[in-house]
Image (spheres, grey):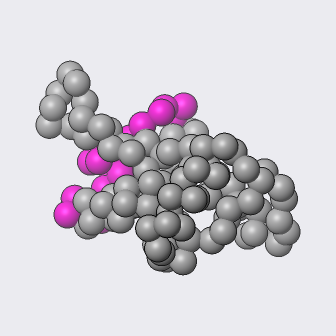
Amino acid sequence: MEQKTKKILDKWALRKIKFLPPLESLNDSDFTFLYIMNNYMEEENVKFVNVSKLSELNQVSLPAISKQLNKLESEKLIKRTIDIFNRRNTKVSITEYGLKVLEIIYQEAKGGTKEC
């Protein structure tokens, strides 16, 4: 995706517009990762997940999770922050933009588009 397009999408996401174009650089495993993370966060009523927990939930190694997180972070779908109480831990959260993308994907999977 072009840099100019990314900037426009980011501005639109911040303004909470009603439509977002699809993210062509993301694949099924990226969306599955976001889906699993979002479900866990909703079920546990938490705002972030540790990288080690993501590794466990997705049943993949820590290096594989890091690669996935790098990609999702570059697309502005997730945000990583260092735990201030234990600097060895990294907390991962889904951005507002990431939640909007998930919502659109859910609607498309249900067979219809709904204005958000």
Residue 115 falls left or right of residue 59: right
Residue 67: percent from the left, percent from the top? 27, 65
Q: Residue at x 58, y 50 (%)?
A: 11
Which stretch appears magenta?
44-63
Q: Nearer the viewer, residue 113 or 88?
A: 113
Q: Residue at x 39, y 45 (%)?
A: 79
Residue 82: percent from the left, percent from the top? 24, 35
Q: Residue at x 43, y 50 (%)?
A: 78
Q: Is residue 110 magenta?
A: no
- The correct choice, above or below, for 67 with respect to 44 in the image is below
Residue 18: percent from the left, percent from the top? 77, 53
Name the quadrant containing residue 71.
Answer: bottom left
Q: Nearer the viewer, residue 16 or 108?
A: 16
In the rendered image, is residue 99 in sight? Answer: no
Q: Is residue 47 magenta?
A: yes
Residue 102: percent from the left, percent from the top? 62, 57
Q: Residue at x 14, y 37 (%)?
A: 88
- Specify the farthest residue to the top: 85
- The correct choice, above or below, for 68 with respect to 42 in the image is below
In the rendered image, is residue 21 in sight? Answer: yes
Q: Nearer the viewer, residue 51 or 57?
A: 51
- The correct choice, above or below, for 82 with respect to 69 in the image is above
- The correct choice, above or below, for 29 with respect to 74 in the image is below
Residue 113 falls left or right of residue 8: right
